[in-house]
Image: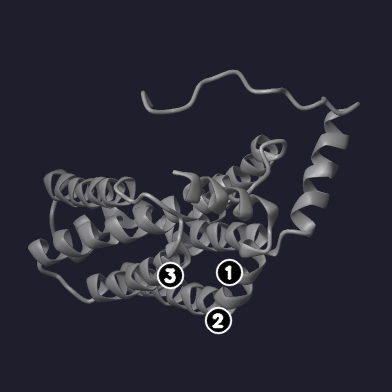
Amino acid sequence: LMRMDASAKQLRPVGPTTEADLASALHYLRHRLHLRALMYHAGAVALLGLPYLVLLPAVAKDTLGGDSRMLGWLTTSVGVGAMTGGVLMARRKHIQGLGKVIAGATAAFGLTVIVVAQTSTPWLACVGFGIAGLCMVSAMISSQTLVQSLVSENYRGRVMSFYSMMTIGMMPFGSLLVGGFAEHFNVQKALMLSGIGCIGIAAAFAWYLPAIRAAARSSPEYSSISSGAKQK
């Protein structure tokens, strides 16, 4: 936070109404394939990936035969993995290659969750959920970084509002979906649903990655980032 540039910025003209501002942001996104793809990815992961967290109590009790202490270990493992992923992403100095990180981390998360669903060994589950936390945070931070870096400053606040709506807004529906699946079948199959879904999301993102990359590099925002990096 200390390294953030907090100098005064020229404020954009405010639209006549909130609806007009939101409509302008939607029009902006309609012509930005790369931003739409990142939002679709974030929403899909929030729907099928992030709800694995709501299954942790059931995993601790039903799969691992533990109690509140076991849940604490699983939650701590996710936290340690997430913190590690955050530190690794914070060390990056540029946005090049983040598209591959998103696809790879999402696929690795899905595969890890599928493997964890098959184990009844506590320490393996802790290691698996730690890796899952690392992968999920890496994918989400990469996505947020690209969105904030590749959006015009005049639209950043509104675009990030739509991004937050996609992530925070979709997670409750995902929790309902995965929780209902776990109730009708079992926790292991619910985790496998989450993992298979995330692998499918990663595959779709990787398939469209060349088009996403081309759209991003043709945007004026990317050109300004590249010119600024060269000046440094």
Front in this rendered view, residue 193 or 94: 94
- Residue at which label 1 appears: 213
Residue type for callout 1:
Arg
* Residue type highlighted by circle 3: Lys
Q: Which residue is mark 2?
A: 207
Q: Quadrant of the N terminus?
A: top left
* 45 or 1, nearer to the observer: 1
Between disc 3 and disc 1, whose residue precedes? 3
Residue at mark 3 to residue at mark 1: CA–CA distance: 10 Å
- The residue positioned 44% from the left and 55% from the top of the image is 142
Which tag is nearer the camera, tag 1 or tag 2?
Answer: 1
Which is nearer the eye, 186 or 83? 83
Q: Position of residue 66 (x, y in %)?
A: 13, 55
Which of pointers 2 and 3 lies earlier in the amino acid sequence?
A: 3
Which quadrant would residue 134 be assigned to in this image? bottom left
Q: Label 3: which residue?
A: 100
Residue sitting at the far front = 231
Measured from the top left, where is residue 5 in percent x and y? 48, 26
Looking at the picture, does residue 28 appear above or below residue 119? above
Q: Position of residue 153 (x, y in %)?
A: 66, 37
